[in-house]
Image (cartoon, rainbow, N blue to C red):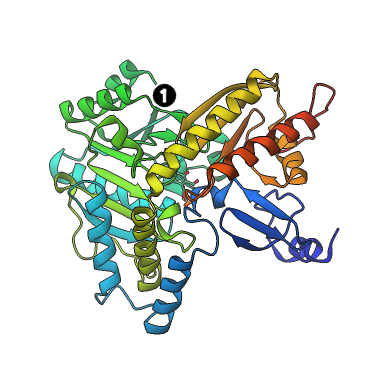
């Protein structure tokens, strides 16, 4: 064990099972290890590093804002916060914004909005309906909204008022939307459970049901948003408008920030209802502005579509060449590679040796969430290196034990 690995074990809680890898730097779609190895980063901080590493516009904005004003309380107004809210809304749907620091917090705010709306407009209806295999965060309420028991079981009892229905079962959803139900909360593409898109037609039907039953549609775009699918928000492919949308991950390009966009129908927050010391601080908001500017100026939505298509074609070519790939799921640069055998952790490990970072989700899926700045050549290189990693885990390979999820 290296010195840093020993120190990490002594100093850090065992919350993460990490590969033996120490990262010290990054540039574009590449990260650098303490051994000087350069790895093509197709994890992208799990959909956070939308501009890659060391983006000049983002780093300059952060440095400039750090010199002016890093933090002030939400007791006071700042221009970056107002401007980011305006720009964010301009990419989405008519709404106003509550800023926080993470995806889970953005969802907590959405749940509070839904509950307050239910008290005001639906005689105390409060149940939030979510889908099986959903992931909405690690706070207690978002764990209650998250489907897989392994995340929430050690921490029971979880808050009441959540109900899960099978993904894709619209009949069950319709039944769940009873007098007590106030909202449907879902990811347009489920990320943590292995990249499972909700079909556009299903999203439209869920929108219709929510309207019919007078419930709020809350979309968790924490992972699927910020241009990842080749449109700014994944739900825009389906042509629907939610009542509430949550955003985080890519918004700050690596600086923590979360946002809850609340449409006019659901806009119930009043002073004192909710708050956050750090939420929407000037530094994070300047970072968010720089990210939005770069997505537009550099044509990153089109790039996500083009490189996503190139990656998908390359991955399907690997499957056609006999590699144990069963399917490629997702959209743009949010891709899940289904594997025929339970080798995802071993393939991810082998990929590091080939100079590539990919993320195993469970044992049969590899997830790719590279920066939106990925070039076509880098997409080809990622496929080539993944092919080599799959070959290294060929039929004779025995997968090493690893934790799910
Ligand atoms: C869809 C979705 N929602 C919420 C979260 C939680 O975000 P955070 O880890 O920033 O709290 C995640 C994190 O992976 C996510 O993928």
Q: Residue at x 86, y 58 (%)?
A: 1
Q: Residue at x 69, y 22 (%)?
A: 324
Q: Residue at x 31, y 64 (%)?
A: 275
- Quarter of the figure with residue 242: top left
Q: Position of residue 146 (x, y in %)?
A: 46, 38
Q: Position of residue 312 (x, y in %)?
A: 53, 30
Q: Residues within 10 Å of mark 1 (few under 14, many from 20)?
A: some
Residue 356 visible from this viewpoint: yes
**Closest to the observer, 306 or 216:** 306
Looking at this view, name the residue that lies furthest to the bottom: 67
Q: In this picture, is 101 found above or below 235?
A: below
Q: Position of residue 367 (x, y in %)?
A: 58, 37
Residue that badge 1 annotates: 167
**Closest to the observer, 21 or 135:** 21
**Closest to the observer, 55 or 298:** 298
Q: In this picture, is 263 found above or below 85?
A: above
Determine whether, in the image, residue 273 is placed left or right of residue 323. Answer: left
């Amino acid at each position: 064990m290296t010195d840093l690995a020993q120190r990490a074990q002594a100093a850090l809680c065992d919350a993460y099972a990490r590969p033996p890898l120490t990262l010290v730097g990054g540039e574009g779609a590449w990260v650098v290890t303490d051994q000087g190895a350069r790895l093509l980063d197709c994890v992208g901080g799990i959909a956070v590093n939308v501009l890659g590493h060391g983006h000049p516009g983002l780093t300059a904005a952060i440095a400039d804002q750090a010199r002016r004003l890093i933090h002030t309380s939400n007791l006071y107004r700042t221009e970056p916060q107002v401007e980011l809210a305006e720009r964010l809304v301009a990419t989405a749907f008519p709404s106003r914004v509550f800023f926080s620091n993470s995806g889970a917090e953005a969802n907590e705010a959405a749940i509070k909005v839904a509950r307050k709306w239910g008290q005001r407009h639906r005689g105390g209806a409060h149940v939030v309906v979510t889908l099986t295999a959903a992931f909405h965060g690690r706070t207690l309420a978002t764990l209650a909204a998250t489907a897989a028991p392994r995340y929430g079981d050690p921490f029971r009892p979880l808050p009441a008022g959540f109900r899960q229905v099978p993904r894709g079962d619209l009949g069950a959803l319709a039944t769940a939307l009873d007098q007590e139900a106030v909202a449907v909360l879902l990811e347009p593409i489920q990320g943590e459970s292995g990249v499972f898109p909700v079909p556009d037609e299903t999203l439209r039907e869920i929108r219709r049901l929510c309207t019919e039953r007078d419930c709020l549609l809350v979309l968790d775009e924490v992972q699927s948003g910020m241009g990842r699918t080749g449109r700014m928000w994944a739900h825009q492919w389906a042509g629907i408008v939610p009542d509430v949308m949550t955003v985080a991950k890519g918004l700050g390009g690596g600086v923590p920030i979360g946002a809850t966009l609340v449409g006019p129908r659901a806009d119930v927050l009043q002073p004192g209802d909710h708050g956050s010391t750090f939420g929407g601080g000037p530094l994070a908001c300047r970072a968010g502005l720089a990210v939005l500017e770069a997505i537009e100026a550099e044509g990153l939505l089109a790039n996500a579509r083009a490189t996503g298509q190139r990656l998908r074609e390359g991955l399907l070519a690997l499957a056609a060449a006999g590699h144990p790939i069963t399917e490629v799921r997702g959209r743009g640069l949010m891709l899940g590679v289904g594997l025929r055998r339970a080798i995802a952790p071993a393939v991810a490990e082998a990929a590091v040796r080939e100079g590539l970072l990919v993320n195993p989700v469970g044992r049969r899926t590899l997830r790719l969430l590279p920066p939106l700045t990925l070039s076509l050549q880098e997409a080809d290189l990622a496929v080539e290196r993944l092919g080599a990693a799959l070959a290294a885990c060929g039929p004779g390979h025995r997968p090493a034990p690893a934790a799910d999820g």
